[in-house]
Amino acid sequence: MNKALFPSKADLRDDAGSTSRSDLVVAGLQRAIFEHKIAPGTKLSEDEVGDIFGVSRTIVRSALQSLAHSQLVTIEKNRGAFIASPSPREAHEVFEARGLIEPRVATMAAKRMTDQSLEILRIHTEDEHAAMHAGDKGKALALSGGFHLKIADIAGHDVFTSFIHSLISRSSLIIALYWRRADTTCESHSHHALMRAFENRDAAAAEEIMRSHIVDLHSGLNLSGPNTPPLSLADALRQD
Amino acid sequence: MNKALFPSKADLRDDAGSTSRSDLVVAGLQRAIFEHKIAPGTKLSEDEVGDIFGVSRTIVRSALQSLAHSQLVTIEKNRGAFIASPSPREAHEVFEARGLIEPRVATMAAKRMTDQSLEILRIHTEDEHAAMHAGDKGKALALSGGFHLKIADIAGHDVFTSFIHSLISRSSLIIALYWRRADTTCESHSHHALMRAFENRDAAAAEEIMRSHIVDLHSGLNLSGPNTPPLSLADALRQD
DNA sequence: TGCACAAATATTGTATACAATATTCCATTG
DNA sequence: CAATGGAATATTGTATACAATATTTGTGCA
């Protein structure tokens, strides 16, 4: 119980390359959710998920708890875990929160923008474009969220970044349930407008574009009647 | 694998009274953190915590993961869990985030304020006052955070509320590390000013008071050199 | 048929045993 | 004496067994 007096081997630990097995399961499920391969409400049986990823229930359980904490999964005592299905109200709140936080983060990103960061964003928008042309709706949607995440990373504010991570994850479920338009062209348009603001290091413009972009997204939801696109679990999680 | 067609007993589940054992451990540790009974950096050995709460490592582990997700605890692979000690930068970010979110929430609370909610807040401020007079620094501090949480509850915006929960928890650690003043009278003063704004249903005033209150808190931090007040674990967690 | 109740089954909750890894302690050596 | 290396110890990571609970199935009865 006595304190260590000298720096130990621990001080030079890398920790970077080591991803825990539970994190792999989290990542797999998250990806499936982001790409709309698993529908909200789907039951996630511990055994089933464990079989698919080849890990024990202990790991699955840990992963599910993690996802539950970020509100992507709902755990009901003695009943199990389900992909969350956000209520219309929750959907509204999530976009309201994004509307407050993301514009602020956009200004911070604009102020810190470097040529290298710009290049990362540019490549990202090209990927978005490509996925949309290829007709891969799920991937395009996931990438579209990824754009917002990259902006948060550039802003370099860890607290806001983690909030945005959480909000964007939940947005993915919300869009699966309530998105009314078929097109995502407004997405692409707004993202390009943001790029121009960033190129000019115009923080005020970036803030305003982001604000109206999120209002657009919010108003693209139909919060009266949810869509219902179910799917099989094993297929959705097939590793590739 | 086939869907249930009929509503089952599950639909009328109460779920309200049942608190899981892991949540009890979380609550116990949280409280100790809020009241500054455990110092940042303290090692939380799974066996030790398990013995104190009388539960197996499985439960403790789950609790620690939960706390890690809300950033109150840091888990290092193969090394264990420690009470988090936020960096000066993190401290700055947390209060920046509070400065963005809480004023907005204060306006929402003002708009939804009822006589009953006012009464709850009034009683709370009295408790704060009492704890401060009694010289119970830890308790006073925990209650002071609680005031902000109650406002969030009244605002009724679950997304913001959960963000604020997280930020206030972290603030508790930050204050333990970086608070420079001995007095918390400014706290009490601001809280009373907020009460007056709420009584008048003056949303704009509430927003402005909250904004400047958080700026005050932020500027009350000494982010160059951390304080270091350690303490024994078993004492801190003694149940009462 | 439709309902109520009980047995059977399946799933989650928890404890524990063992494996993997880190930390501590001690002897050896320069 | 300090530094190094390695055994001994302690702690966390994971799988699994069993207990507790929910769900399903099946049977009898009106």
Image (spheres, coloured by chain):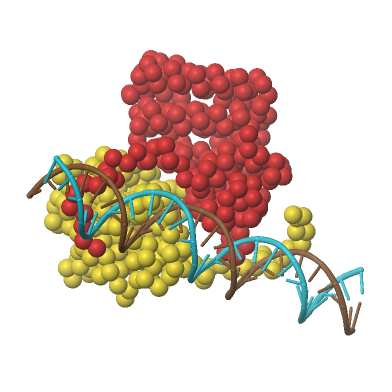
Chain colours: A red, B yellow, C cyan, D brown
- Which image quadrant is residue D15 in? bottom right
Q: Is residue A135 visible?
A: yes
Foreground residue among A101 and B9: B9
Foreground residue among A207 and A177: A177
Foreground residue among A234 and A182: A234
* Image height of B51 relative to A220, above or below: below
* Left or right for A195, reference D5: right
Residue B211 at what x, y percent from top left?
Answer: 29, 44
* Image height of A143 relative to A53, above or below: above
Q: Residue at x 57, y 54 (%)?
A: A56
Residue C1 at what x, y percent from top left?
Answer: 92, 68
Q: Can you say which quadrant of the picture contains the C terminus of chain A?
A: top right
Q: Residue at x 28, y 69 (%)?
A: B234
Foreground residue among A233 and B195: A233
Q: Residue at x 57, y 41 (%)?
A: A28
Q: Is residue A216 visible?
A: no
* Left or right for A239, reference B50: right
